[in-house]
Image (spheres, grey):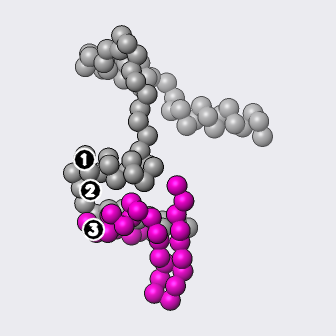
Amino acid sequence: MQMTIQLTPQGMLINNPIIQEWLRYGVDVTQESERIIIRPKLFPKKKRLAQILAEAGLLVSPPPLPFRHRPLSIKEQETLSHKFSVGRPLSEIIIEERTDRI
């Protein structure tokens, strides 16, 4: 999907269907370093939001779950969280591996 942006004496004009829809609900515009972020103030109902995103080509359906998929129980989630919390932070491991390449 392509977005058309035009600079005018009145400001920046953005031609994008999803942003046009957000304007009905109001938008928040913020600047972070070298980018401008435009977010809707209030999202419309969930079904309408999904429809808006799909029409704009911004909605990706997740792949189907395997046939025998079973969600983890609370106990299994706790066990895994304890296993993964042991050791050094992943960021330290990545930095250490990268120093060998430099």
Q: Could you say which is closer to the camera, residue 30 or residue 76?
A: 30
In magenta stretch: residue 50: no
Residue range (magenta):
1-30
Residue beneath the point at 21% across and 51% down: 45
| Residue 33, visible in the rendered structure | no
Q: Between marks 3 and 1, how big is the CA–CA gap? A: 16 Å
For mark 3, give the secondary structure.
Answer: loop
Instruction: Give the percent coordinates (x, y) of residue 79.
Output: 33, 16
Q: Mark 3 points at which residue?
A: 24
Which residue is the extreme one toward the left? 45
> Is 37 left or right of 41, judged from the image as shown?
right
Q: Identify the mark nearer the N-term, 3 or 1.
A: 3
Q: How many labels does the image show?
A: 3
Q: Mark 2 points at which residue?
A: 43
Q: Residue at x 25, y 66 (%)?
A: 25
Kindly identify the amino acid type of the residue bearing the numbered disc 1. Answer: Lys
| Identity of the residue drawn at 24% across and 55% down | 44
Q: Distance between the residues labelled 2 and 3?
A: 10 Å
Q: In this view, does 27 lie above or below 77?
A: below
Give whichever of 31, 61 is nearer the camera. Answer: 61
Viewer-proximal residue among 76 and 60: 60
Determine whether label 1 and label 2 are within 8 Å by CB.
Answer: yes
Q: In which quarter of the image is the C terminus?
A: top right
Residue 68 placement (x, y as % from top left): 36, 10
Q: Which of marks 2 and 3 is nearer the N terminus?
A: 3
